[in-house]
Image (cartoon, helix red, strand yellow):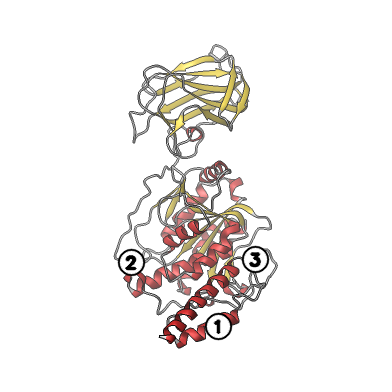
Amino acid sequence: MRRTRLCQTVTVGLLVLMVVFNLRVLLNRNEGAVGSEADVAQLLKEKEMCNQPVIVNIESKADVVPLNASFAHQKWFSLGSDMFKMVGFQRPQKGFLTIGIPSIKRINGMSYLVETLSSIIDKTSTEEKTKVVIVIFLADFDTEYNTGVVKVLTEKFMDYINMGFIQIIQATRDFYPPLTNLKRNFNDKADRVKWRSKQVVDFAFMFLYSHNISDYYIQIEDDVICAKNFITSIREYIKSMNNVQWVLLEFSELGFIGKLYKSSDLIALGRYMLMFYQEQPVDWLISYFRLSMAQRKVYLRKPTLFQHIGVKSSFDVKKDNKLKDKYFDSGDKPWRSDDPPGIVISNMKPFEQWLPSLAYGSGSGFFWASNVKEGDWLVIAFNTPVRLKRIIIETGHPKSRKDQLLNGTLEWSPRVIKLNEKTQQVTCSSLQKLGTFVDGHLDVGGLDSTSSPTGGAPVNCLRVVIGKGQKDWVVFNQVAVFVNRL
């Protein structure tokens, strides 16, 4: 009885010390005697005498590489310079976004990875490529396969590697903790436990490696495609969350696709993953990390920006994975328009996250206005007055065809008198009618002519006004603005 109580006391003491020790480590503190390694070692020894399972922490003796050309010693979950290889170079200045792509061998080779990279390259502008870094982590233990992938990628994407837009990294086996005799939580088979535990460590490696490359980090899988102008959409969504305390923003509803973090949180996230690598699948761990960081709500941007295209699983070659993101919108609008810069404001309430700004520009999504009534309005205030040539407005959507604007008009103004984006207030002077909606559609051309309603004059403001009899909600699918370039 006394031995049982002693073991219970030792167990409680060990757990308390381990929590203190791990929290201290996560917070990068080295001071103080409470929870020292010697204390833990002594309790571990006493606990072994009680024939109880113990928690074993992962520790590396290598120096940390903070990726800014300086070295600092840190004993906990450190990423040593001898633990990875890289093809490419690190830019001297931090960028806006790092896109992490872990990749392992699949039955169909590297075709998914090449398609994913091609999609990112195609959907990013030349300017965006100077602010974004793609980090490809070849995480397979088959070094011969990895060498083949490097050969193909360097031949196909060398220009982007040379400009620092693409980096290819590999980790040595020294970085990995034991991947045998793991806990069989949830009665998973041993091979599946090994696969998912290694996946957790793979992701942790990416977090630690990428923590100082850009301001933000987003991870996708190696078998996805991107929406048009997805970088702009990410920027705008981050900006819209300025007044929210967030740790994780999501740009896909599936797995670990489109999960975005502040780079300042990556070290803590990486250590968290390593601490529980054999306990839970990675999808669960990211939810627990979010909750641990006091973010209870899930912030999923709709429409989402990444679509899963892979079919062949990276784990079970006999099983196809046909999951699709139901919120994904490719961003392919009906019209290729000029869309001069401006601010979109409406007094109509958006449904969920289908905001007014999504109706204008070439990004993905649309404005879904709810509880629409006569007199409601949507305004586009251009940053500077522009000479227009044509305006096309499409309402309704293939998935919600009845949500069309049945009765409405378009007006124009040469000058914006007052504009407050925060309060959604705008006043435009001398508004004049430009056109009327017919069957949810408006098309006004010839605006560069002196005989047009604008007289060819510069336009600073466009306003859509809801007419009588509108009963359904309205989807503003696209406001396409064409300018006179003469």
**Residue assigned mark 1:** 41
Characterize the local packing of mark 2: few (<14), some (14-19) or many (20 or more) Cα atoms within 10 angstroms.
few
**Compared to 50, does 85 lie above or below?**
above
Amino acid carrying label 3: it is Pro
How far, Cα to Cα, is label 1 from label 3?
A: 29 Å
Q: Where in the figure is residue 355, as x and y percent of width and height?
A: 48, 35
**In which image quadrant can residue 472 be found?**
top left
- Dots 1, 3 in contact, CB < 8 A: no
Amino acid carrying label 2: it is Asp
| SS assignment at label 2 | loop
Badge nearest the viewer, 1 or 3 = 1
**Residue assigned mark 2:** 316
**Residue assigned mark 3:** 66
Residue for point 34% across, 53% down: 323
- Left or right: residue 454 compared with residue 352: right
* Nearer-N-terminus badge (2/3): 3
**In which image quadrant can residue 396 be found?**
top left
| SS assignment at label 1 | helix
Q: Where in the figure is residue 167, as x and y percent of width and height?
A: 57, 61
Amino acid carrying label 1: it is Ala
**Front in this rendered view, residue 246 or 65:** 246
